[in-house]
Image: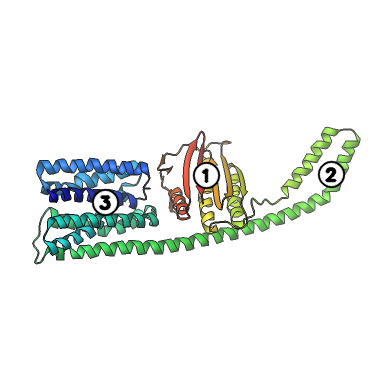
Amino acid sequence: MLETILWIVHNATTLLFGVLVSAAVLDVRMERANVLWLLGFSAVSGAAFALVNAWAGELVARQLYPLVVHAPLAVFLAWRFRRRVSLCVFAVLVAYLCCQVSNWVGLLSLWASGSMCVYYGVRVVVTVTVLVVLLRTLASMGGWILEKSGASLALFAMLPAVYYVFDYVTNVYASLPNSGPKVVSEFTAFVLCLFYLVFLFSYFKQYEERSAAEKLNWMLETELAQASREVEAQRRSVREIRVLRHDMRHYLQGISLLVGQGDEKGAQERIAEVIGFIDQTVVRHWSANDVVNMALSTWSERAEATGVRFEAEATVPRELPVPEADVFAIMSNALENAVRAASEAGEGNGVVEVSLRESGERLLLSVGNTFGEAPELVDGVPVPARRVDDAGVEHGLGVQSMRRAAERLGGNLLCSVEDSYFWLRVVL
């Protein structure tokens, strides 16, 4: 009786392990709604496995496990969380490989004790422990795998895929003879799993460091370009001021003449004309922080070039409470998406509204824009729509990257569609 109960608990925890780890690889946030969806799928899959087991026996149920659980799980993740099918298959393969840790430790306990109750009990404990560790680790890693191209993903998936096929061929669909205990023959797979996990985490660490360096380099290059533009703007302002100073006497004489003739309306128009000339000599600074000015200036110019009305208000100090490189990256991604979407809203309808302020040592960024077609939101962010630019580089995951950056800084990101505006709000 105890062995049967432990067998059921073991299969249930293993199923939950595979579902939750697969979702974590795909950067699915473990929020209440998402967890309920994942638990619901686990319950349906568990019931299907139990029915097959009761109808045809445990051996057939294990042989049909890929069709009963793995394939539906990949389809479910692709449908519910709008991930590419290839990514979902990769996530399921990685989760299956990670099960080998529990498998080998359980076999070791069975070899030492000779008790199936001990085997199932140890597997349950190890499965839950590894699940907690992986969920925390994968959450810190973020969804960097989502940004990989198909070719890169194929390289990452090669080892889990080979292990998956090998394990089913040798241990499920056929039982090949071996000269020693099963705990010995499975040790290689156990080491392989550990090696793969260490490789993924090490790769991510290097990837994160490289991304930080690229982000800083990108900011410096943009800063240099913006500095050149500002120098040219200052020169243009100086030239315009010289012209205005030369012509000011004539303007004032003309205004004086109009006032003397009692032409108040003409004088007012002349004064407004002078004020307009003066406004043109002003080089705009959005805030006290240079990085914020750089991002707003860059994208206000690009918005103007595409016929998009750009309105911004930034009340932040010279020293920001979070790293400037992250602020610049998030603002640039947000403004790029906003300007591009607003440019598709139709002639005269493109608008981008930006607000950035500090509150309680936090930065509050709000970016709103009109659009041509309303985006579909899943898990609080738009569904990724991959596109290829003129250089052949894929885009479409900027919002996910911004959300991960915000969460890494202890903040959050939320998107919404309100009337004719798409709003992106970030707390840093």
**Comes first in the chain, label 3 or label 1:** 3
Amino acid type, callout 3:
Phe
Q: CA distance from mark 3 to mark 1?
A: 39 Å
According to the picture, the residue beneath numbered tag 2 turns out to be 251
Q: Position of residue 254 (x, y in %)?
A: 86, 41
Which label lies toward us, 2 or 1?
Answer: 1
Q: For mark 1, does the 10 Å Cα neighbourhood hold few (<14), some (14 to 19), or many (20 or more) residues?
A: many
Residue 413 image point, x, y percent: 47, 47
Give 118 or 79, whichever is nearer the viewer. 118
Which residue is labeled 1 in the image?
338
**Side of 179 relative to 378 (left or right):** left
Q: Is residue 419 left or right of residue 263?
A: left
The one nearer the camera, 366 or 275, is 366
C-alpha gap between disc 2 and disc 1 = 42 Å
Sequence-wise, the earlier of marks 2 and 1 is: 2
Residue 226: image location, x then y, percent: 61, 57
Helix, strand or loop at label 3? It is: helix
The residue drawn where x is 13% and y is 62% is 113
In the depicted structure, whether residue 420 falls above or below residue 176: above
Mark 3 → mark 2, Cα distance in angstroms: 79 Å
Q: Callout 3 environment at 10 Å: few (<14), some (14 to 19), or many (20+)?
A: many
Question: Which kind of residue does numbered mark 1 sit on?
Answer: Ala
Mark closer to the chain start, 3 or 2: 3
Tag 2: amino acid: Tyr
Where on the picture, by quarter, is residue 38? top left
Q: Which residue is mark 3?
A: 17
- Between 48 and 117, the one lying in front of the other is 117
